[in-house]
Amino acid sequence: MRLPEPLAAYFAAANARDVGKTVGFFTADAVVKDEAREHRGTEAIRGWIEDTNGKYRPSFEPKQVTGSADRPQVETVVSGDFAGSPVRLRYSFQLEHEKIARLEIA
């Protein structure tokens, strides 16, 4: 499976646990919704990534891409230090100018 850019680079940075590079894929006012919480703006998103990496040490394996060019959905197998690992999650992106404006994980 071939992921469109910038999603391939996003997942590569996330798998490398490169927080700075991962945050760089988001717009300044981006929103991430994960585990019933919203994180708004790059500083909040940086905190979410650092917290998630520290607690779960996740790794991501994208399996399928659906949706449109500006609203892709990526079915992803996520493994890590959490109950039920691995799990299959849907990453729903909203892209603006090759950056992530919104990400919902369910």
Image (cartoon, grey):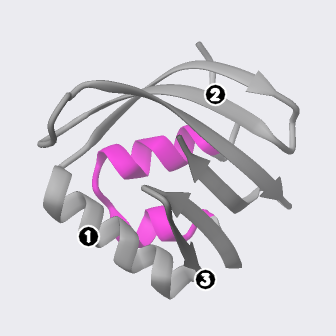
Residue at image location 59% in from the left, 12% down from the top: 1
Q: In terms of secondary structure, where does tag 3 sit?
A: loop
Residues drawn in magenta: 7-25
Q: Estimate how packed mark 3 is, as few (under 14), some (14 to 19) or many (20 or more) residues with alpha carbons within 10 Å.
A: some
Q: Is residue 39 above or below residue 13?
A: below
- Which one is in front, 59 or 36? 36
Q: Residue 39 in the image: x percent, y percent? A: 53, 75
Inspect the magenta stretch and tell me whether residue 14 lies in it: yes
Toward the front, the furthest residue is 36
Cα–Cα span, label 2 and label 1: 26 Å
Which dot, 2 or 3, sits closer to the camera? 3
What kind of element bears circle 2?
A: loop
Q: Residue at x 78, y 52 (%)?
A: 94
Cα distance in 3D space between marks 3 and 1: 16 Å
The chief SS type of the magenta part is helix
Residue named by callout 1: 51
Kind of element beneath mark 1: helix
Task: Sort mark 2 into few (<14), some (14-19) or many (20+) by Cα contacts within 10 Å.
Answer: some
User: In front: 43, or 105?
Assistant: 105
Residue 100 painted magenta: no
Classify residue 76 as left or right of residue 72: left
Mark identifier at residue 41:
3
106 left or right, relative to 65: left
The first of marks 2 and 1 along the sequence is: 2
Name the spot of residue 104 as percent of width and height, x first: 61, 51
Amino acid type assigned to the residue bearing label 3 in the image: Gly
Q: Position of residue 93 (x, y in %)?
A: 70, 47
- Tell me if residue 72 can be seen: yes
Q: Look at label 1 and name its amino acid.
A: Asp
Q: Which residue is mark 2?
A: 3
Between the C-alphas of marks 2 and 3, the distance is 25 Å
- Residue beneath the point at 32% across and 44% down: 15
